[in-house]
Image (cartoon, helix red, strand yellow):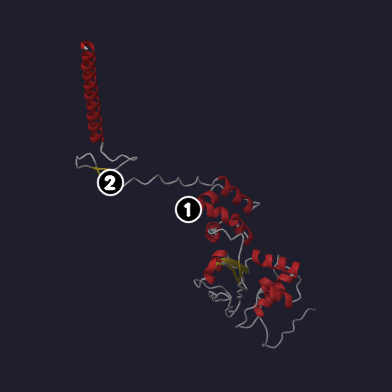
Amino acid sequence: MLRHAIAPARFFTQTPNEIIRHPRLSSDAVRLLQWQLSLPDGADQPLSETARQAGIKKTAFIRAKRQLIDEGFLHEWRRQGVAGRWRTTQLISNVPLTPEEALAVRDGDGDAAASPTAVEPAVGQPTPRAVGRSQENTEGNTPHPPHPLAERGAQALTTVTRGERRLRLSGRDVRALAPLAAEWLTRGATLADLRDALTSGLPDTVRSPAGITRDRLTRKMPDPAPEPGPRPQPLRACTGGCGRMIRPVADETACRDCRMDGAAAAHDASGAAAATERGMAAVRAALCARS
């Protein structure tokens, strides 16, 4: 017979059964999550330090952290701070959060079951830790900064696929596909465009939601927006003396009529000059003959 011994109601942390019985979280991931959630208010301890205190080795810690990210218990963002340097912000909760929900919690626009309060940390100075949340700031030069629209792409994917059970994407899938969705947005696509491309004509059974999503995002990618044409030149006064305003196409300074008049006048002048030269030549020839 199995009996439960209930400890006194002090110095304890309530852990949801969903975490304890989670089929895809290893014992190290559960221990790491429980330890982090058990920290008192005011503590600001990074996950790496928690892993060290819990006796979780580096390789096991990396694997456990990846599992927590994939299942939505841990979210990370890299954002550019002062002087072009990048820092990492972490949010951990005792319930899975979608990327969109995590962003809302981080920015103070939403509530999770753990009721964390997102605070923008100051550079070089950790902020107090709220219940169910730990933030870690690491600042340094990053050779490969994240895609600037990756978060928008992740939000768009989450919004589009949330109501479609056949396209259930894990947190890792969303992060991997976010740059493709972001490229759609840069090409002028809307959420309606994404939803139509990803959900229309789906088979009754989808064996690989991430695979079919990647295929459709790639195969149906809209064409790049056309490059804007050259800006028209400003209006200017015609230099031919007609008083008109013209918009030059190239480097002309006079209107068409004035240019034609000028060309005709030049032609007449050149003809008169040629006739005069012919007359002078005839006079010179006659003088030469007399002499």
Q: Nearer the viewer, residue 277 or 135?
A: 277
Quadrant in which the C terminus appears: top left
Crowd tier of the residue under label 1, counting other residues whose Cα lies within 10 Å: few below 14, some 14–19, many 20 or above: few
Determine which residue is flagged by label 2: 235
Q: Position of residue 77 (x, y in %)?
A: 58, 66
Q: Position of residue 214 (x, y in %)?
A: 60, 50
Crowd tier of the residue under label 2, counting other residues whose Cα lies within 10 Å: few below 14, some 14–19, many 20 or above: few
Q: Position of residue 289 (x, y in %)?
A: 23, 11
Quadrant in which the N terminus appears: bottom right
Which is closer to the viewer, label 1 or label 2?
2
Q: Is residue 217 above or below residue 25?
A: above
SS class, disc 2: loop
Q: Amino acid at mark 2?
A: Leu
Q: Would residue 61 appear left or right of 237 to someone viewing this image?
A: right
The answer to whether residue 111 of the structure is visible from this angle is yes
Q: Nearer the viewer, residue 136 or 18?
A: 136
Which of disc 2 and disc 1 is earlier in sequence?
1
Q: Would residue 66 appear left or right of 102 to someone viewing this image?
A: right
Q: Would residue 137 appear left or right of 67 to someone viewing this image?
A: left
Residue farthest to the top? 289
Determine which residue is flagged by label 1: 192
Q: Residue at x 23, y 23 (%)?
A: 271
Residue farthest to the front? 291
- Which image quadrant for residue 125? bottom right
